[in-house]
Image (cartoon, rainbow, N blue to C red):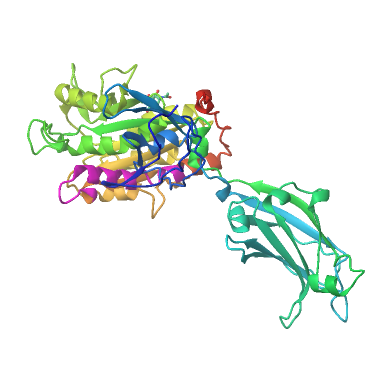
Amino acid sequence: VVSCGQPAVSAFLSSRTWETFGRTEVIDNTLNPDFVRKYIMDYFFEEKQNLRLGKVFLKCGLFSPGADVLFSLHHSGIPGKKCGTIILTAEELSNCRDSAMMQFCANKLDKKDFFGKSDPFMVFFRSNEDGTFTICHKTEVVKNTLNPVWKEFAIPVRALCNGDFDRTIKVEVYDWDRDGSHDFIGDFTTSYRELARGQSQFNVYEVINTKKKMKKKKYVNSGTVTLLSFSVESEFTFLDYIKGGTQINFTVAIDFTASNGNPSQSTSLHYMNPYQMNAYAMALKAVGEIIQDYDSDKMFPALGFGAKLPPDGRVSHEFPLNGNIENPYCNGIEGILEAYHQSLKTVQLYGPTNFAPIINHVARYAAAVQDGSQYFVLLIITDGVISDMAQTKEAIVNAAKLPMSIIIVGVGQAEFDAMVELDGDDIRVSSRGKLAERDIVQFVPFRDYMDRTGNHVLSMARLAKDVLAEIPDQFISYMKSRGIKPNPAKSPTPQGKQHKE
Ligand SMILES: *[C@@H]1O[C@H](CO)[C@@H](O)[C@H](O)[C@H]1NC(C)=O
């Protein structure tokens, strides 16, 4: 029930200023308007995309999983006065990625060649908004027949009808001529929706030559074209899996080696400045705040490596930041930051910088859920120089077989040459002659993203954008290679559609 005048959706955030993104139509004289205008918005997994409706802020990651979002409107002048509820429904435009596979044959086409029969081929056109036509497919020529059977072909649905299932598709049938002056046999129109019915009486088309029809009283047609088969192949997206319930298990690992410097000194990368986050905290927050939208319970395991632990001073390369091996989960990004600060006070920074134990730690969990219900993202934040390169490569090659991605953020001023090697963008990581099945590592040095004017919000947004950009593709490459399809989307919340008069 909306009762605050004329409601209008109003804003879209681009970096620092709000821009109007869309405005609904006005519906007169009702407190329960059902707005029909839709807005198409580009979706980027790796960015924080915020929407504002009046004074209410929304994150795109929250409403992308297909369910309705309900939020209450409050009166700005009278605190506590409620002004109704707005229901926002978002869906992903999916048909744009589908490909249609079709096969056609024709019967009793007109004979056009003086010697022999015809050499028929077909040309497909999609119609544009302005009524013009654009060619989108040409079949091969079948020689010397009036009853050709063309080969099956695939065409992106976008190319065929721009994703609009009811849009006219025009098909022209020609007789091929060596000199290029192909003879027009006739044409017919259809639509994606009709074709999608597959082989049936509805998909037999009369090929009509309008000129011939006007001249000859007894003209029936210039033959028929029959659809023999039709199927659609969809490319699933990251969001399809998230909608189907796949959870992202986000694990954080923090470097507690001595090279970071004594945390009590301001030169340390772990220095806790009461007024400003250190690079570890910034990297963690930047990446974590985006990933957490895809993790429903927002409980994140957080680990440390390269420190001496109390009470016995044993060096550990995989210890829980909250000190609880049974339950390493921290509550949200804030919880991780708190556990991180706490452990800085209790452990002693040491070394060496071993990555393999952490990677193998997460890989053990990933190995236990290979059915597509979970995908593991390990964020390693480190000041650099890795000590167990051979073991780390071996761990990466093994992890590449699992539902897992690794993000490494380098902080500080070290040389990160070795890390670049782990990021298989140019040369795929290999170990003992085995090549990693997929590229699962993304490495970035945080210093490259630092805003020169000291705007940390900007630095963090840039870092997250780059570091997360490859995750959806890595995720899809795993699901595809294992033949895992997304589960059907969970139905939207039932209260979403109720409108009480
Ligand atoms: C997520 O992964 C961590 C290991 O990185 C593991 O401790 C935790 O149990 C996993 N969570 C779930 C729900 O499987």
Lateral position of residue 102 relative to residue 388, left or right: right
Residue furthest bottom as drawn? 179
For the magenta stretch, what is the residue range?
Answer: 449-474
Lateral position of residue 148 relative to residue 74, left or right: right
Lateral position of residue 347 relative to residue 305, left or right: left
| Residue 376 seen from this side | no
Quarter of the image with the N terminus in it: top left
Residue 234 appears in which quarter of the rendering?
top right
Q: Is residue 152 above or below residue 305?
A: below
Q: Nearer the viewer, residue 400 or 45?
A: 45
Residue furthest left as drawn? 265
Q: Is residue 465 above or below residue 306?
A: below
Residue furthest right as drawn? 218
Q: Nearer the viewer, residue 185 or 430?
A: 185
Percent from the top left, x then y, of residue 32?
Answer: 48, 30
Q: Report the residue at 91% width, 70% height from top.
A: 217
| Residue 323 seen from this side | yes
Q: Report the residue at 29% width, 29% height from top.
A: 333
Q: Is residue 137 above or below residue 450?
A: below
Q: Report the residue at 49% width, 28% height from top.
A: 369
**Quadrant location of ligand 1?**
top left
Q: Main secondary structure of the magenta part?
A: helix
> Is 462 in the magenta?
yes
Percent from the top left, x then y, of residue 159?
Answer: 59, 58
Count of marks placed on residues: 0
Percent from the top left, x then y, of residue 45?
Answer: 40, 42
Percent from the top left, x then y, of residue 355?
Answer: 30, 36
> Is 487 in the magenta?
no
Q: Report the residue at 43% width, 36% height from top.
A: 404
Residue 180 appears in which quarter of the rendering?
bottom right
